[in-house]
Image (cartoon, grey):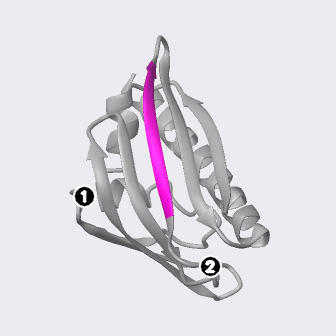
C-alpha cells in the first residue's frame, strides 16, 4: 500500500487551524483550490459523522469525495475515511495532526492505503494545493484581524 506523508507550517494557533477543518463553510473557503468554484461541502463534524465534498473542475467534470470522521481530538487530530469517485482505488484513510509550535502550527497529513501510484501522486498534488491554500487563507484572515 502507498501513502502520502506531508507537513506544512502555518503561523496561526492550532485552535485557528483546527477550526478551518471543523465546519462546512470554513472547509469550503480553502479546500479544492483547483476547482472553478467553491466546493459544496456538507459535514457532521463528530466521530461517526459523515462528510461530502463536491468539486466542479474547470474542464466541466464533477468529483465527489465522501467519508466518515473516525476520530476527532480538538486542536490535535482528525482521522477520516476518504473515497473520491474520480479514482478506482478503494476507500483510504486520512490523518491530520496539529502540533503547536512557538510561532504557529505544524500540520502533518498522512493519507494511507492507496493501491495505485498514479492515484497516490494525484492526491499528493491535490493535498499540496489544498494545504497551500489553507495557509494562504489563514494568513490573509490574520492580516485582516490586525
Residue 115 appears left or right of 19: right
Q: Work out whether mark 1 precedes mark 2 in sequence or the reverse, and give the earlier one.
A: 1
Marker disc for residue 125: none
> Which SS type dominates the magenta stretch?
strand
Disc 2 designates what residue? 89
Q: Residues within 10 Å of mark 1 (few under 14, many from 20)?
A: some
Q: Which residue is depicted at the point 76% across and 62% down?
A: 121
Q: Locate the N terminus by quadrant.
A: bottom right
Q: Nearer the viewer, residue 52 or 145?
A: 52
Residue located at (56% from left, 63% from top): 32
Q: Residue at x 49, y 14 (%)?
A: 103
Query: In x, y percent, where is residue 37?
Result: 53, 72
Expressed as whole percent of the image width and height from the top left, the position of residue 93 reads 49, 61
Q: Is residue 55 magenta?
A: no
Find out whether the residues at labels 1 and 2 contact each other: C-beta distance under 8 Å: no
User: What residue is shown with label 1?
Assistant: 45
Where residue 70 appears, x then y in whole percent? 31, 58
Q: Is residue 113 above or below residue 52?
A: above
Q: Secondary structure at mark 2?
A: loop
Q: Which residues are magenta?
A: 93-100
Amino acid at each position: 500500500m502507498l501513502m502520502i506523508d506531508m507537513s506544512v507550517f502555518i503561523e496561526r494557533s492550532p485552535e485557528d487551524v483546527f477550526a478551518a477543518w471543523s465546519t462546512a463553510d470554513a472547509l469550503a473557503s480553502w479546500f479544492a483550490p483547483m476547482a472553478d468554484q467553491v466546493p459544496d461541502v456538507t459535514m457532521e463534524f463528530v466521530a461517526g459523522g459523515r462528510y461530502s465534498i463536491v468539486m466542479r473542475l474547470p474542464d466541466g467534470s464533477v468529483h465527489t469525495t465522501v467519508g466518515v470522521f473516525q476520530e476527532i481530538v480538538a486542536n490535535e487530530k482528525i482521522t477520516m475515511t476518504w473515497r473520491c469517485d474520480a479514482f478506482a482505488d478503494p476507500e483510504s484513510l486520512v490523518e491530520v495532526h496539529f502540533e503547536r509550535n512557538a510561532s504557529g502550527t505544524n500540520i502533518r497529513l498522512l493519507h494511507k492505503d492507496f493501491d495505485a501510484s498514479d492515484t497516490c501522486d494525484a492526491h499528493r498534488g491535490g493535498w499540496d494545493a489544498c494545504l497551500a491554500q489553507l495557509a494562504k487563507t489563514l494568513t490573509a484572515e490574520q492580516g485582516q484581524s490586525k
